[in-house]
């Protein structure tokens, strides 16, 4: 929950939002054919990112952004699935891409400092772990 009343959740293959403390949940539509896998919202309840994958089971990952909690646009498309996303209120964020073989958390870390308008590959998570 982002506040006592507002929150987001991924349940099975859908994205849901509550505005009444979780008493009722409303399904939120993503672009056709996409299934949510991760989400992160900034300090307010409407400005956020959702990582998604195609329903077809393809390994491609997408990061979708919203500023109104209703309309989502693609701000990043990756060749492989997404292991994690983080978004901060100042518009900076990171995406962890999984490895080509699907291994979680060992692909590159991709960074934005401008709400996803541009992206920079920092390094691979595996290189970071080796120190």
Image (spheres, helix red, strand yellow):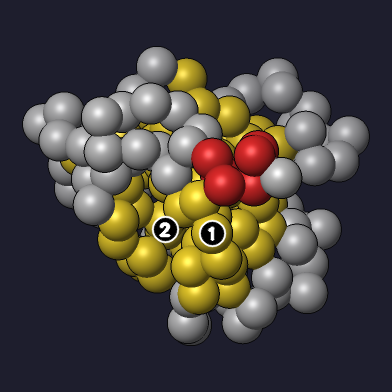
Local SS, label 2: strand
* Residue at mark 2: 64
Question: Residue 45 vs residue 118: left or right?
Answer: right
Question: Residue 69 vs residue 98: left or right?
Answer: right
Q: Quadrant of the N terminus?
A: top right
Give the crowd class for mark 1: few <14, some 14-19, many >=20 residues within 10 Å.
some
Question: Residue 44 vs residue 8: left or right?
Answer: right
User: Is there any visible trace of residue 2 in the rendered image?
Assistant: yes
User: Is there any visible trace of residue 50 in the rendered image?
Assistant: no
Where's residue 13, x and y in %? 34, 24
Q: In the rendering, which numbered label is found on residue 56? A: none
Q: Quadrant of the C terminus?
A: top right
Give the crowd class for mark 2: few <14, some 14-19, many >=20 residues within 10 Å.
many
* Displayed quadrant of residue 4: top right
Local SS, label 1: strand
Where's residue 122, x and y in %? 56, 66
**Which residue corresponds to the image point at 43% horizontal and 44% vertical from the top-left?**
107
* Residue at mark 1: 123
**Which residue corresponds to the image point at 65% horizontal and 38% vertical from the top-left?**
129
Where's residue 60, x and y in %? 23, 45
Q: Nearer the viewer, mark 2 or mark 1?
A: 1
- Location of residue 93 with respect to 6 vertically, above or below: below
Disc 2 + disc 1, Cβ < 8 Å:
no
Distance in Å between CA atoms under marks 2 and 1: 22 Å
Where's residue 21, x and y in %? 79, 28
- Mark 2 or mark 1: which comes first in sequence? 2
**Which residue corresponds to the image point at 48% horizontal and 37% vertical from the top-left?**
106
Question: Residue 80 vs residue 75: left or right?
Answer: left
- Location of residue 14 with respect to 114 vertically, above or below: above
> Which residue is nearer to you in this view: 91 or 71?
91
Instruction: Return the residue found at the far left.
Output: 56
């Amino acid at each position: 929950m982002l506040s006592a009343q507002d929150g987001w959740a991924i349940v099975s293959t859908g994205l849901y939002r509550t505005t009444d403390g979780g008493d009722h949940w409303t399904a939120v539509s993503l672009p056709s054919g996409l299934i949510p896998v991760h989400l992160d919202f900034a300090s307010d309840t409407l400005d956020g990112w959702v990582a998604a994958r195609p329903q077809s089971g393809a390994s491609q990952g997408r990061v979708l952004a919203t500023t109104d909690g209703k309309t989502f646009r693609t701000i990043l498309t990756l060749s492989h699935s997404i292991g994690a996303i983080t978004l901060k209120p100042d518009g900076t964020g990171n995406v962890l891409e999984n490895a080509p073989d699907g291994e979680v958390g060992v692909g590159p870390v991709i960074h934005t400092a401008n709400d996803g308008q541009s992206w920079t590959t920092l390094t691979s998570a595996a290189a970071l772990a080796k120190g």
